Image: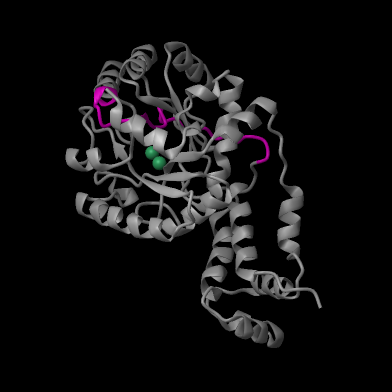
């Protein structure tokens, strides 16, 4: 008889591939729930339940996931997983591939502490599997109540939790602390200064008043960029596009239902000049529905001398692999790897965020 595979690992792998392909949340959830339901079970009990057909009696386990478990235990790659692996395409050209290979971490990710779908541990494990050396955890700030933004107190608790999680993670990988802080209407940042100073990386984004008129939005962004705590300017224009890059199909996840939004209006040359002056990196947001900034603005930021961060803004583990979309767009605009801050090691990255003017 063939040697049993790890059924939990297979379920998690399927969930990852579905998320990466931007499939509907409910499809992904079936596999994540099953993995969670079975994680604590002994191999003997799993085998017994698979044998007598009682896996589906457990909450969170359905026919499809039970079949996957049975196949894994029989030592076969589950058919569902095999099909997913066979149909995923790789259409990156050489430059984009090289850029992707140069990335050593991700500076913009969310967990279930704010509006992400998975615990910090799950996000970290997926990042380890992708070969990342670090993951910056950037949950939302207090004013973004719809996304369960973290109060100062919850953020302090998260920092303690991250320290514990880090202690249990494989050597050579670590979660860096961070935040996606709201850039408020007056350009100030939505979190206490002492906390912002404590964090490894601060991403700042505009989430409200996206229709502010041009001079107001420009002032707002210039003030934020000049703030010494702000390291990376997130999804610069706030746009939402309905089109998706090749290879991304399916009805999409939360916040992705063909909702489009125009770019906010601001003086991009002034903002990028300020980013270059204050050494604030411009994010290339990889989310298929954002693709932000648009390529014409990436080129202008490049000409202005800005640094970049190619981030996923992942809200689920499989989305951590969306960096390839950002790399494609960066490569099309000629962004060289040495301008991208997440090609650095964690030590170099943190040295940069702490030493910035
Ligand atoms: Zn955001
Ligand atoms: Zn975000």
Residue 341 colored magenta?
Answer: no
Screen quadrant of the C terminus: top left
Query: Up-down: is 175 above or below 336?
Result: below
- Number of labelled discs? 0
Q: What stretch is highlighted in magenta?
A: 224-247
Residue at the location (28% across, 44% down)?
A: 141
Residue at horizontal 39%, vertical 58%? 167
Does 242 appear in magenta?
yes
Residue 261 drawn above or below residue 74: above
Q: In this view, does 84 lie to the left or right of 231?
A: right
The image quarter in which residue 211 lies:
top left
Percent of width and height locating residue 232: 37, 30
Vertical position of residue 349 compared to residue 24: above or below: above
Q: In which quarter of the image is the N terminus?
A: bottom right
Q: Can residue 129 be seen in this view?
A: yes
Q: Which residue is drawn at 52% across and 32% down?
A: 241
Q: Give left or right: position of 191 versus 349.
A: left
**Residue 73, position as x, y percentages in the image:** 71, 75
Residue in front for this viewpoint, 93 or 62 = 93
Q: How is the image coloured?
A: one colour
Residue 22 in sight here: no
In the visual, does 28 lie left or right of 221? right
| Quarter of the rendered image showing ligand 2 | top left
The answer to whether 41 is drawn above or below residue 110 in the figure is below
In front here: 26 or 324? Answer: 324
What kind of secondary structure does the magenta stretch mostly adopt? loop
Estimate the x, y position of residue 296 in percent, counting from the top left. 51, 17
Residue 109 is situated, as x and y percent measured from the top left of the image, at 43, 45
């Amino acid at each position: 008889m063939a040697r049993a595979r790890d059924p939990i690992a297979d379920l998690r792998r399927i969930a990852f591939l579905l998320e990466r392909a931007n499939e509907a949340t409910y499809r992904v959830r079936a596999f994540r729930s099953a993995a969670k339901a079975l994680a604590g079970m002994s191999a003997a009990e799993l085998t017994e339940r698979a044998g007598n057909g009682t896996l589906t009696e457990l909450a969170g386990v359905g026919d499809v996931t039970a079949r996957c478990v049975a196949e894994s235990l029989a030592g076969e790659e589950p058919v569902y997983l095999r099909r997913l692996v066979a149909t995923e395409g790789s259409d990156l050209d050489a430059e984009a591939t090289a850029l992707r290979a140069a990335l050593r971490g991700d500076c913009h990710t969310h967990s279930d502490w704010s509006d992400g779908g998975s615990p910090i541990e799950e996000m970290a494990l997926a990042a380890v599997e992708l070969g990342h050396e670090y993951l910056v955890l950037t949950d939302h700030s207090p004013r973004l109540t719809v996304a369960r933004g973290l109060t100062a107190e919850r953020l302090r608790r998260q920092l303690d939790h991250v320290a514990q999680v880090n202690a249990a993670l494989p050597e050579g990988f670590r979660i860096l602390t961070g935040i996606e802080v709201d850039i408020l209407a007056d350009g100030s940042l939505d979190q206490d200064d002492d906390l912002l100073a404590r964090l490894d990386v601060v991403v700042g984004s505009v989430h409200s008043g996206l229709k502010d008129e041009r001079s107001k939005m420009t002032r707002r962004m210039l003030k934020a960029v000049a703030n010494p705590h702000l390291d990376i300017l997130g999804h610069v224009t706030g746009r939402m596009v309905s089109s998706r890059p090749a290879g991304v199909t399916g009805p999409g996840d939360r916040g992705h239902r063909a909702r489009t939004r125009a770019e906010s209006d601001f003086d991009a040359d002034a903002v990028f000049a300020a980013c270059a002056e204050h050494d604030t990196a411009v994010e290339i947001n990889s989310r298929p529905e954002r693709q932000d900034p648009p390529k014409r603005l990436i080129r202008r930021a490049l000409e202005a001398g800005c640094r970049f961060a190619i981030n996923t803004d992942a809200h689920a583990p499989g989305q951590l692999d969306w960096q390839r979309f950002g790399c494609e767009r960066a490569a099309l605009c000629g962004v060289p790897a040495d301008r991208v801050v997440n090609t650095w090691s964690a030590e170099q990255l943190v040295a940069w965020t702490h030493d910035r003017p």
